[in-house]
Image (cartoon, helix red, strand yellow):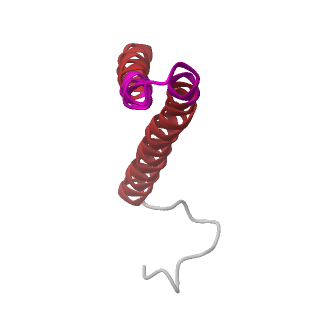
C-alpha cells in the first residue's frame, strides 16, 4: 500500500522505524560532539584569560612582563590536561 492509501492505524514498517532510530542516534551524537567542542573552546579561552590575567598582574607587580606568557602557557596546559581527563572519563562511562 502506498503511504496515501494506508490506513492511519496501520503499523509503520519496522525497517523505517530502525532507520529513524539510527538517524536520531546520529543526531544525538552530533549534538553531544558539538557540545563537547564548545566546552573545550570555553575551557581554553577561560584559562587563557584567568591565568594570563594573573600572570599579567603578577608581572606588573614584580616588574617581569614575561610572567604574562608563563601565565597563558600554564593556563593552556592546565586546560588541555583537564580536557583530556574529561574525555577519558566520559569514555569510561559509556
Residue 29 is left or right of residue 39, and the answer is: left
Residue farthest toward the bottom in the current orientation of the protein:
4
Q: Quadrant of residue 41?
A: top left
- Percent position (x, y) of residue 20? 44, 57
Can residue 94 be seen here? no
- Tell me which residue sits at (49%, 41%) in the image: 45
- Tell me which residue sits at (47%, 35%) in the image: 48
Residue 1 magenta: no
Quarter of the figure with the N terminus: bottom left
Residue farthest toward the right in the current orientation of the protein:
9
Residue 61 magenta: yes
Q: Main secondary structure of the magenta part?
A: helix
- Percent position (x, y) of residue 29? 42, 44
Residue 85 is left or right of residue 4, and the answer is: left
Please give the count of numbered marks on the rendered protein: 0
Quarter of the figure with the C terminus: top left
Q: Nearer the viewer, residue 22 or 61?
A: 61
Location of residue 3 with respect to 35 vertically, above or below: below
Q: Nearer the viewer, residue 74 or 81?
A: 74
Q: Nearer the viewer, residue 26 or 85?
A: 85
- Percent position (x, y) of residue 86? 44, 20
- Percent position (x, y) of residue 19? 37, 56
Can residue 66 be seen here? yes
- Tell me which residue sits at (52%, 26%) in the image: 51
Question: Magenta part of the protein: which range?
Answer: 57-75
Q: Quadrant of residue 79?
A: top left
Amino acid at each position: 500500500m502506498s503511504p496515501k492509501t494506508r490506513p492511519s492505524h496501520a503499523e509503520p514498517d519496522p525497517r523505517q522505524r530502525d532507520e529513524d532510530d539510527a538517524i536520531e542516534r546520529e543526531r544525538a551524537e552530533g549534538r553531544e560532539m558539538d557540545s563537547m567542542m564548545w566546552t573545550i573552546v570555553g575551557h581554553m579561552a577561560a584559562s587563557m584569560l584567568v591565568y594570563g590575567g594573573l600572570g599579567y598582574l603578577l608581572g606588573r607587580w614584580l616588574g617581569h612582563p614575561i610572567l604574562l606568557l608563563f601565565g597563558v602557557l600554564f593556563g593552556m596546559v592546565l586546560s588541555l590536561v583537564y580536557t583530556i581527563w574529561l574525555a577519558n572519563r566520559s569514555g569510561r562511562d559509556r
